[in-house]
Image: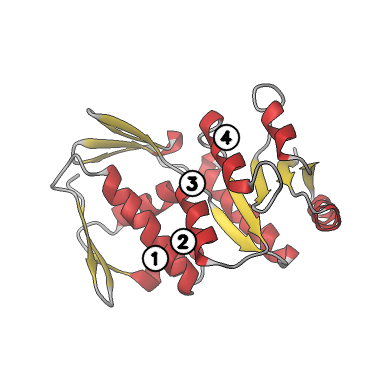
Amino acid sequence: MKTKVLLVEDDSDFGLILKQYLELSNFEVSWFQNPADVVEILDSDFSFNIGILDIMMPNIDGFSLAKIILKEKPNFPLLFLSAKNQKIDRLTGLKIGADDYISKPCDPEELILRIKNILKRVSPATLESHFKIGTYTLEAEKLLLTHPNEKVRLTIREKELLLYLLKQNNQTIKRDDILNQLWETNDYFTGRSLDVFISRIRKYFRHDEQIKIQSIRGVGFEIDFPV
């Protein structure tokens, strides 16, 4: 069965090229030029495996569309496309819950690789089971972090990072090791992306003071998860 891709791109030339390349790479692509049309099918015909959203679109921009989709489909994997390479765009997309981000014009082969990496992370074969972390429970297959006072729905990237931190518990972890393992690069933007994810994970664990993710300047992080 082919992977079903939701492509939302208002540029007719770029959208057509991207759709054709994805189809040549054995993906089934539904291409929408109007984001409002995607909103209309959320309650009925929304059977996609991953979404690729352009950011700069009329009426409904990619960030707004992502919020609408994730409200209804909180586990849905998303990748943003943007003609801009500004830090604010990248960080905004990650805060919303995107799994990845690529700037236009993009290398189609790189895009295919990023899509496959995201899908690999959400594949049932790669999902872990239950973990106790202090007073929290992580249900990785459901992307759910539970505390008696709160339930948090994780993004795929958050779950991936949290599982990596768990495996390195009670150790000092180098930033470069995390970036190379999870992002497969360690440039400025991915480094800032890591900071966003670490900040969010710290916030999720705010109900248990024993759980510590301490930053070590110039090195990385020291992890203490009571398990």
Query: Circle 4 sits on which residue?
Result: 68
The residue labelled by disc 3 is: 96
Q: Is residue 21 visible?
A: yes
* Name of the residue lying farthest toward the bottom: 218
Secondary structure beneath dot 1 equals helix
Q: What is the count of numbered marks?
A: 4
Confirm or deny contact between disc 1 and disc 2 (CB under 8 A).
yes
Q: How is the image coloured?
A: secondary structure
Write down the residue under mark 2: 182
The answer for how far apart the CA atoms under marks 1 and 2 are is: 6 Å
Structural crowding at the residue carrying mark 2, measured as other residues with C-alpha within 10 Å and reported as few (<14), some (14–19) or many (≥20):
some
CB atoms at circles 2 and 3 under 8 Å apart? Answer: no
- Viewed as shown, does residue 103 lie left or right of 4? left
Query: Which numbered disc, 3 or 1, marks the residue closer to the eye?
Result: 3
Q: Amino acid at mark 1?
A: Ile
Tell me the CA gap for discs 4 and 2.
27 Å
Measured as percent of width and height from the top left, residue 203 is found at 28, 47
Tell me the quarter of the image containing the C terminus.
top left
Question: What residue is shown at x 24% (from left), y 74% (from top)?
Answer: 217
Going from the N terminus, do you reach mark 2 or mark 3 first? 3
- Which numbered disc flags the more N-terminal residue, 4 or 1? 4
The residue where tag 1 is placed is 178
- Residue furthest toward the top? 44
Q: Residues within 10 Å of mark 3 (few under 14, many from 20)?
A: some
